[in-house]
Amino acid sequence: MMKHKDKIMTAVTAAVAVAVVICAIIIAARQLGVVEGYDFGAGAYYYADIPGFETLLNDEAYTTSVPLWVHIILFLGWGWLMWRLWSWVERKTG
């Protein structure tokens, strides 16, 4: 027997799923995000397929005094924290 909160969450999940499918259909039908002039089909979304894309990259566009290894440690730490949070949420809800 479903609790009231479970029924609400099921309804919210279904509504979000329907909204995502509708948005995906609209995006595909209107071809939103496709770069005009680059007719690569699905590959239009991969930057590597755009001719001369490497010339658009500017290594000097982002500079920082923080070493790269600090960014990597922060990235991995954030991932670990999110994994711990997700594990905690699963224990509490399941």
Image (tube, rainbow, N blue to C red):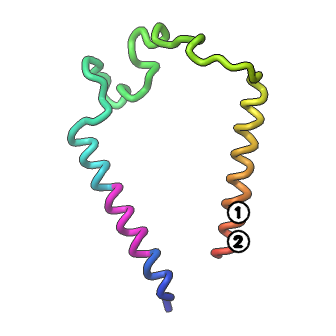
Query: Which image quadrant is residue 30 in?
Result: top left
Counting from the top left corner in percent of width and height, residue 68 is at: 74, 23
Q: Inspect the magenta stretch and tell me whether residue 41 lies in it.
A: no
Query: In the figure, is residue 94 to the left or right of 2?
Result: right
Q: Which residue, as the protein is rendered here, is positioned at the far front? A: 65
Magenta highlight: main SS:
helix
Tell me if label 2 and label 1 are in contact, CB under 8 Å: yes
On residue 91, the disc is: 2
Q: What stretch is highlighted in magenta?
A: 10-20
Relative to residue 72, is residue 13 depicted above or below? below
- Give residue 86's quadrant in the image: bottom right
- On residue 87, the disc is 1
The type of residue carrying mark 1 is Ser
- Please report the residue visible at 39 percent of the width from the left and 11 percent of the height from the top: 51
x and y percentages locating residue 81 in the rendered image: 73, 51
Judge the density around disc 1: few (<14), some (14-19), many (≥20) Cα neighbours within 10 Å. few
